[in-house]
Amino acid sequence: MPRTYEEELKYIERINSHCWRIKKGFVPNMNVEGVFYVNNHLEKLMFEELETASKFGGIGGFLPGMKQIANVAALPGIVGKSVGLPDVHSGYGFAIGNMAAFDYNDPKAIVSPGGVGFDINCGVRLLRTNLTEKDVQPMKEQLAQSMFDHIPVGVGSKGVIPMNAKDLEEALEMGMDWSLREGYSWAEDKEHCEEYGRMLQADPTKVSQRAKKRGLPQLGTLGAGNHYAEIQVVDEIYDRFAAGKMGIDFKGQVCVMIHCGSRGLGHQVATDSLVAMEKAMKRDQIQTNDRQLACALIQSPEGQDYLKGMCAAANYAWVNRSSMTFLARQAFARCFNSTPDDLDMHLIYDVSHNIAKVEEHIIDGRQKTLLVHRKGATRAFPPHHPLIPVDYQITGQPVLIGGTMGTCSYVLTGTEQGMQETFGSTCHGAGRALSRAKSRRNLNWYEVLDELKEKGIAIRVASPKLVQEEAPDSYKNVTDVVETCHAAGISKLCVKLRPVAVIKG
Amino acid sequence: MQKYQFVVIGGGIAGVTCVESIATFHPEAQILLLTGTPLIKAITNYVKVSKFLEEFDIEEKPFSYLAEQYPNLTIQNKVVTRLDTDRQVIFCMDNTQMQYDQLCICTGARPKLLSETNPYVLGIRDTETVESFQKKLSTAKQIVIIGNGGIATELVYEVEHCSVIWAVKDPHISTTFFDEAAARFFLERIQLAKEKQKLNEKRQKYETTDRLASAQSSTGNLCGGALGPDWAAERSMKGTSPQPRQVHIEYEVEVKSILTSDEYQERKLSTNTVQSSNEVQWPVYVELTNGKIFGCDFVMSAIGVAPNVELFLKSTNFTLGADGGLLVDANMRTSVKNVFACGDVCTAGWELAEHWFQMRLWSQARQMGHYAGKCMLAYANNEQDSLTMDFCFELFAHTTKFFNMKVVLLGKYHENDMKKYENLIRMTPGEEYIRVTLKDGRVHGCVFIGDTELEETFENLILNQIDVSAFGETLLDPNIDIADYFD
């Protein structure tokens, strides 16, 4: 008997004004509790989504965020809590905006590609400049055009250099070290990048031929959908001191934000692993609540292979972002008849929001090695953490939050509270709650479809796009999301940015 | 006699890309490009939309452009008359000969014409024929367009101030690309006046250089390289009718005969023109298989293309594909040693990937040209064992514009497949049309019309072959951010 909404609510308990707990039993086999962060508006959306799913027995095969958070809590070897960040929304396997950490040394603990995402190391980087909005406004079209006039197959200062298979192998292994060697990156860029732009466990031999073939033509390309580059200006500075450490000094200061990942290569690595792991689950007697949560024991061959391949894909994404950085620097330099150095186009930071990391954390006073899955979630290490650059030791790691293309973006900093509560994780952007579309019938149109059906063509019809006024307000906008993180203490607001030009690949 | 390591015949997209591919990977290679017309296409404003979908402008540039880029590339404006594949020698019209180590045939295909001799029956294929068409159109009141593919569809949209009779052999329009529902979606737009090009269009540059007065003027049939995308943009295609838009469609018909004015009078049949005046005397009349006869100023034949293989068959027994093109294997090799072929002239003879098929499109010509160049190099260096097909041959992907709406086609989207498998459809009138065909619960093919922003997501779904059967039509629910879900 499926539960009623009221019955479901019995498992959800408010912790404080920004946080709710999901008790064990909400879904079967929960090993730990779930937790999610919201403000008033986001809270409404979370519960409405659950209610709609209860009422209608699901939303067309998509699970509400709360259920997904709980299903993740049922995975073997999970420690702490399954955390839903304020932008949490339905995703494949794990929800997007879900952090889950597993005891690396627990032989029963698992790793799951769904907890990383298909676009491995989809992430954001932010470059600063010493230009003002006034400098850029008259030039912005040229600037944008200049940036993406030629999207190269490979990167080169003289134009197109085709990437060959050997270059790709090296890029997979070396990440930003490859970009540095080839001259596309500055040495300081490495310092200001998560993992210094290279995950050492990467093993290109664990990336399939098909993945490499998908990746080869794409190195240096932006992709589509919600991947983009933006020329932005500083709209607000909340924390002058921290912003100053990042080189952000005044309102109207121009920055460049690049948001992209590993494209087809990441997709193939994830897909290959899902297939391999599904096969191994029987052998290792792993059970999950959701088929999409295919996973493997961390220490199994499938688990290790995935991690090595994932690291290689992550390296690829960093090479991609470095290539974009190179282009952006060249474009600005050309447009302003200057050099990237003179324009102070330094990399503030680069974060990943689709990745799994091996990290040391303190749990109940003891240090443990954890495998932290962050899907649609960003690492946010606090001040004095050894893995963040020297210049951010006092202020904490910068966290880059790209809003939806065309809306504003934010820079946050990591906090000690975040380190305790979410293993140093925070949100990544915006999201949308599931809602049931109102059905609209356009009579003429449906006649055509009936005719098709009569011809024996099997059709299922989705509801049409609704006009703005009719569209349900299920949107979790980035401002609500970051303010919630700030209020909950898991990261601190630092800078708000506003786009002046958007470049889509 | 001059000897070259690599010779390419044909200066259209396939040939030029092939040459560029060889030259970039092996700058020291001795390459010869033979082209019968003086114009060569150069791809500019190349923008990758997603990993498979490419949008680019094709700009015609004179010889010098390519030669400047690649010093070891020789380009000659010559017409090939004979090929001796045993001795590996090419003979040209000007009595010169050259020897090749590896040859690539990129001679493309020419439009099939309903009548080769009737001056009132036109086809369009290259810049020259487009200009000829524009000129004739500028004094026309009514034309008949025969055909149901891309060119015909584009023509119907682009022509203004001229009454159009569109005769298609299928039960609905644009069958090459659309199913019935999509066709119906477009039908609503056909009668609308042509809109201004949307903002954020990529720049279109289409230069016409002066044609060299040269030997090829005597070659009559020789066509220049095929038109690229956006061939119609910024070209005036206006007739003399006061009404901006008037389209009449005849379904499930073929052309029975084409009559001259005199022949028509002899027939003494009553005409059936959209212009009710019976006294109008048209220079040409089209009799359709449904009995109707339409008079017009001229007829546009857009019924497909025929690969330009005749010249080569004269001297050598090339194996042909079912559609008359030179059959090539997975390394773009024809059945004749050291001869490759790519672009419209060839027929893909390898075991095709599940979601790919050949269609004579400029994007495929470019992809084949690039790959053929790599193959030729590999064989020249005895490295053919390391050859693997480029990933673009894994998934059919085409992006274009019809009736001023963006159209993206992925995988096996055709109507034939549509009948066998399940289809998810989402349509918002006037704005977008989406059809996703599923096979065994996985995405098999898609049609996207309008700014759906879903192309990359579904490309990945086809390539990943993720089981999406659990979602049903909710997969296309506009309130669900499906791109994010699978990111």
Image: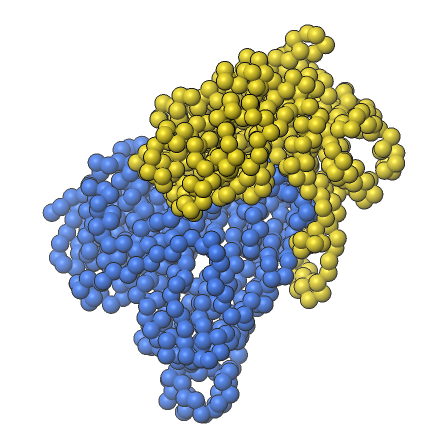
Chain colours: A yellow, B blue
Which residue extends farthest top?
A366
Left/right of residue B239 with respect to residue B381 in the rendered view: right
Left/right of residue B382 with respect to residue A466 in the rendered view: left
Q: Residue A300: tell me if it is visible.
A: no
Residue at x-position 87% and y-position 30%: A10
Q: Quadrant of the C terminus of chain B?
A: top right
From the viewer's side, name the closer residue of B118 and A378. Answer: A378
Residue at x-position 62% and y-position 46%: B439
Which residue extends farthest left?
B1
Residue B359 in percent (x, y) is at 44, 54
Quadrant of res B238: bottom left
Residue B207 in percent (x, y) is at 30, 59
Residue at x-position 67% and y-position 61%: A449
Left/right of residue A304 with respect to residue B479 in the rendered view: left
Left/right of residue A373 with respect to residue B395 in the rendered view: right
From the viewer's side, name the closer residue of A141 and A284. Answer: A141
From the viewer's side, name the closer residue of A454 and A308. Answer: A308
Quadrant of res A96: top right
Q: Residue B160: tell me if it is visible.
A: yes
Relative to A40, say whether B366 is above or below: below
Residue at x-position 47% and y-position 53%: B200
